[in-house]
Amino acid sequence: MTVLTEQTLNDILQYLEKSINSLAAEGLDNLEINSAEEIKNFLENQFDIRLENLLISKNSSIHHLESGMKNTVIQKKQEIIEKISKQLNN
Protein backbone atom coordinates (compact mmCIF):
# COMPACT_ATOMS: atom_id res chain seq x y z
CA MET A 1 0.00 0.00 0.00
CA THR A 2 1.08 3.54 -0.76
CA VAL A 3 1.11 6.29 1.84
CA LEU A 4 -0.78 9.29 0.49
CA THR A 5 0.39 12.85 0.89
CA GLU A 6 -1.91 15.59 2.16
CA GLN A 7 -1.89 17.13 -1.33
CA THR A 8 -2.97 13.87 -2.99
CA LEU A 9 -5.78 13.47 -0.48
CA ASN A 10 -6.87 17.09 -1.04
CA ASP A 11 -6.90 16.49 -4.80
CA ILE A 12 -9.05 13.39 -4.30
CA LEU A 13 -11.46 15.27 -2.03
CA GLN A 14 -11.77 18.16 -4.51
CA TYR A 15 -12.55 15.68 -7.28
CA LEU A 16 -15.08 13.94 -5.05
CA GLU A 17 -16.80 17.21 -4.22
CA LYS A 18 -17.25 18.00 -7.91
CA SER A 19 -18.41 14.45 -8.60
CA ILE A 20 -21.00 14.37 -5.81
CA ASN A 21 -22.24 17.87 -6.69
CA SER A 22 -22.68 16.81 -10.31
CA LEU A 23 -24.51 13.69 -9.22
CA ALA A 24 -26.83 15.73 -7.04
CA ALA A 25 -27.45 18.32 -9.76
CA GLU A 26 -27.93 15.97 -12.70
CA GLY A 27 -28.65 12.50 -11.45
CA LEU A 28 -31.14 12.74 -8.63
CA ASP A 29 -34.03 13.56 -10.94
CA ASN A 30 -33.58 10.19 -12.62
CA LEU A 31 -33.61 8.23 -9.38
CA GLU A 32 -36.66 7.03 -7.54
CA ILE A 33 -35.73 8.70 -4.28
CA ASN A 34 -38.52 10.46 -2.46
CA SER A 35 -37.28 11.75 0.86
CA ALA A 36 -34.45 14.02 1.87
CA GLU A 37 -33.10 11.26 4.11
CA GLU A 38 -32.95 8.81 1.19
CA ILE A 39 -31.10 11.39 -0.90
CA LYS A 40 -28.64 12.03 1.92
CA ASN A 41 -28.03 8.29 2.41
CA PHE A 42 -27.56 7.79 -1.33
CA LEU A 43 -25.04 10.63 -1.61
CA GLU A 44 -23.13 9.45 1.47
CA ASN A 45 -22.91 5.94 0.01
CA GLN A 46 -21.76 7.29 -3.33
CA PHE A 47 -19.12 9.40 -1.60
CA ASP A 48 -17.81 6.34 0.26
CA ILE A 49 -17.78 4.13 -2.83
CA ARG A 50 -16.11 6.74 -5.03
CA LEU A 51 -13.57 7.61 -2.33
CA GLU A 52 -12.54 3.99 -1.91
CA ASN A 53 -12.26 3.53 -5.68
CA LEU A 54 -10.07 6.62 -5.99
CA LEU A 55 -7.88 5.47 -3.10
CA ILE A 56 -7.54 2.00 -4.63
CA SER A 57 -6.40 3.62 -7.87
CA LYS A 58 -3.60 5.20 -5.80
CA ASN A 59 -2.73 1.82 -4.23
CA SER A 60 -4.22 2.88 -0.93
CA SER A 61 -7.40 2.46 1.11
CA ILE A 62 -9.38 4.38 3.70
CA HIS A 63 -8.09 1.86 6.23
CA HIS A 64 -4.50 2.87 5.50
CA LEU A 65 -4.96 6.60 6.01
CA GLU A 66 -3.55 8.29 9.09
CA SER A 67 -6.16 9.34 11.65
CA GLY A 68 -5.74 13.03 10.77
CA MET A 69 -6.44 12.25 7.13
CA LYS A 70 -9.48 10.17 8.08
CA ASN A 71 -10.78 13.13 10.08
CA THR A 72 -10.25 15.39 7.07
CA VAL A 73 -12.25 12.96 4.92
CA ILE A 74 -15.09 12.78 7.46
CA GLN A 75 -15.27 16.57 7.77
CA LYS A 76 -15.24 17.07 3.99
CA LYS A 77 -17.95 14.44 3.51
CA GLN A 78 -20.17 16.15 6.09
CA GLU A 79 -19.53 19.55 4.53
CA ILE A 80 -20.43 18.34 1.03
CA ILE A 81 -23.59 16.51 2.13
CA GLU A 82 -24.79 19.42 4.28
CA LYS A 83 -24.25 21.91 1.44
CA ILE A 84 -26.19 19.74 -1.00
CA SER A 85 -28.97 19.13 1.53
CA LYS A 86 -29.39 22.87 2.04
CA GLN A 87 -29.56 23.43 -1.72
CA LEU A 88 -32.17 20.70 -2.13
CA ASN A 89 -34.30 22.08 0.69
CA ASN A 90 -34.46 25.53 -0.94
Image (cartoon, rainbow, N blue to C red):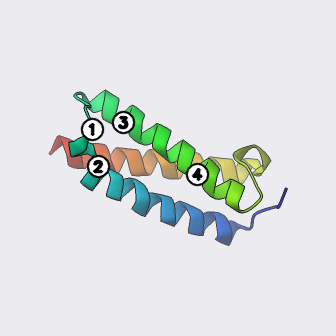
Q: Which residue is mark 4?
A: 51
Disc nearer the start of the sequence (2/3): 2
Q: Which residue is mark 2?
A: 27
Mark 4 or 1: the one toward you: 1
Tag 1 and tag 2, C-beta contact below 8 Å: yes
Query: Given the current orientation, which residue lies at the most extreme right position?
Result: 1
Classify mark 3: helix, strand or loop. helix
Residue 2 appears at what percent x and percent y?
A: 83, 61
Residue flagged by tag 3: what amino acid is it?
Lys
Q: Residue at x 71, y 52 (%)?
A: 68
Q: Residue at x 79, y 48 (%)?
A: 64
Classify mark 1: helix, strand or loop. loop
Q: CA distance from mark 1 to mark 2?
A: 7 Å
Q: CA distance from mark 4 to mark 3?
A: 16 Å
* Residue 38, above or below 56: above
Classify mark 2: helix, strand or loop. helix
Q: Which residue is mark 3?
A: 40
Residue 34 appears at what percent x and percent y?
A: 22, 28
Q: Residue at x 14, y 45 (%)?
A: 90
Q: Which residue is mark 1?
A: 31
Left or right: residue 4 compared with residue 8: right
Mark 4 or 3: the one toward you: 4
Left or right: residue 9 compared with residue 67: left
